[in-house]
Amino acid sequence: MDIDKELNELFNDPLLDVNDKELTLFNIPSDMKRVMEKRRIQPDHYAQKKPCEDFHLYKPLFETVQQELKEGKRSLVRTSKTANMDEGHFYVVDGMLVLLQSIGQKKRSRSGMIDGRTRCIYENGTESDILLETLRRNVLHDGYGVTDTQDAIDDSFFNQSMTEGDKSTGYVYVLKSLSPDPEIAGVKDLYKIGFTINTVEERIANAEKEPTYLMAPVQIVETAQIVNMNSHIFETIIHQVFNAVQFQLKVYDEEGNLHIPAEWFVVPLEIINLVIQKIVDGTITQYSYNAELQCLEKRLIKKTSTFNTDGLKVLTLNIKEGFFKEIMSGEKTSEYREIKQTTINKYTYIDEADGKRYLRHYDVIRFYMGYHKDRDSALVEITDITCLSGIVEYKLGRVLEHISNKETQHTCVD
């Protein structure tokens, strides 16, 4: 068979003839060409990690944060698209702690959020000048924010001195949505709680065009003028107290961009007023919100360990509530951990004598149930440690200590 002849006959078939008019169907519109050109433009700068020359200044901070996470003084929290990312705060990306040390010249990104070149310090001793918007995407995709300690919140929020001539630093406000959307209008006790340095009327002037207001007009329910209040800390406390009743709804702006507003909560108005009052007088640290009973619960003093671990090598692990309960009941007798790049030094070590890597020896495991501040913990004996295919198995023995912090006193609002 003559392949060349067959191909020539095929391509010369009249059915394949295309006239000028038909050819125009394959033309790319000019506006689309401009978009494609913009996408082809290469950035003038790539953020690259490099050794952090002054890491010795930051290493103690990372060690302190890691310890506070283990002790429950800090927690890992998921962040939203509308959450602020502030200088001096810690985040977790790809399993590694990151300090947002500074943000350079700030500007608005296409999403409307603050953007700019950052200086990010990583716990492995490197740094980068990644864009804030890129850091935000990384944290949203597979990361966490790290909360401040309660002591830090108290120091920066409640212990501010009052001086003569103090001026208002802003307004706390409670809003109700006037949206006709049944997914919103049909929700009882749905309120937005926020803080503004301007008047509330100015802040909500364009509510129907802003995703944070659910793209609809709002009604002012309550306002309170505040003196010497840190807005970021106020919002952090509100989110911590009402985290369990945060209203989750996807909202699209006028350009079709997706947003999930973070300041709407399903909670009775009297509870909101009580929480704001306790934030202002500094007593909110003693309470948590019980969504089922719709009341504030006064927490008892957190219990601490009394077991003497001197001379014991302690491995600290976080586990889910279900697994924790299985260990307490004796149903779960082994704990498995995968050796990853970020945890290899936690579970193994290199012997300087022969240069080989071995499993680290631990005597006990301190299990923490979840990441919240008042979580239960337990100290459990290890009877054997083995490793197969990169998975470490810790054989569990006796439960040496169990600390429960679930006891509370109800202080409900009628």
Image (spheres, grey):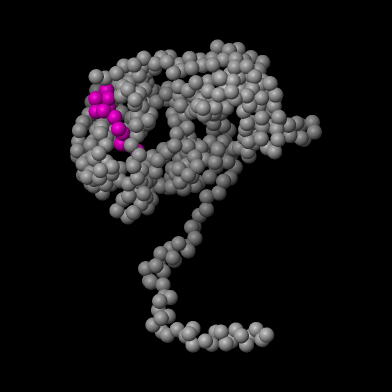
Q: Quadrant of the C terminus?
A: top left
How many labels, in total?
0
In this picture, which residue range is highlighted in magenta?
262-274
Instruction: Locate residue 361 relative to residue 190 in the image: left or right.
Output: right
- Toward which corner of the image does residue 279 lie, by quadrant? top left
Q: Which sits in the foreground, 245 or 110?
A: 245
Vertical relation: 407 (above or below) 57: above
Residue found 38% across the figure and 45% down from its top: 114
Q: Residue furthest right?
A: 354
Does residue 273 appear anywhere in the picture?
no
Q: Which sits in the foreground, 17 or 167?
A: 17
- Toward which corner of the image does residue 261 lie, by quadrant? top left
Instruction: Locate residue 349 relative to residue 115 in the image: left or right.
Output: right
Asked if the magenta segment contains residue 271, the reply would be: yes
Residue 133: percent from left, percent from top? 43, 47
Q: Which sits in the foreground, 14 or 366?
A: 14
Q: Quadrant of the N terminus?
A: bottom right
Residue 234: percent from left, percent from top? 33, 30
Residue found 52% across the figure and 40% down from its top: 93
Residue found 60% across the figure and 84% down from its top: 7
Residue found 39% across the figure and 67% down from its top: 32
Asked if the magenta segment contains residue 273, the reply would be: yes
Vertical relation: 26 (above or below) 238: below
Does residue 409 appear anywhere in the picture?
yes
Residue 390: percent from left, percent from top? 68, 37
Residue 362: percent from left, percent from top? 67, 23
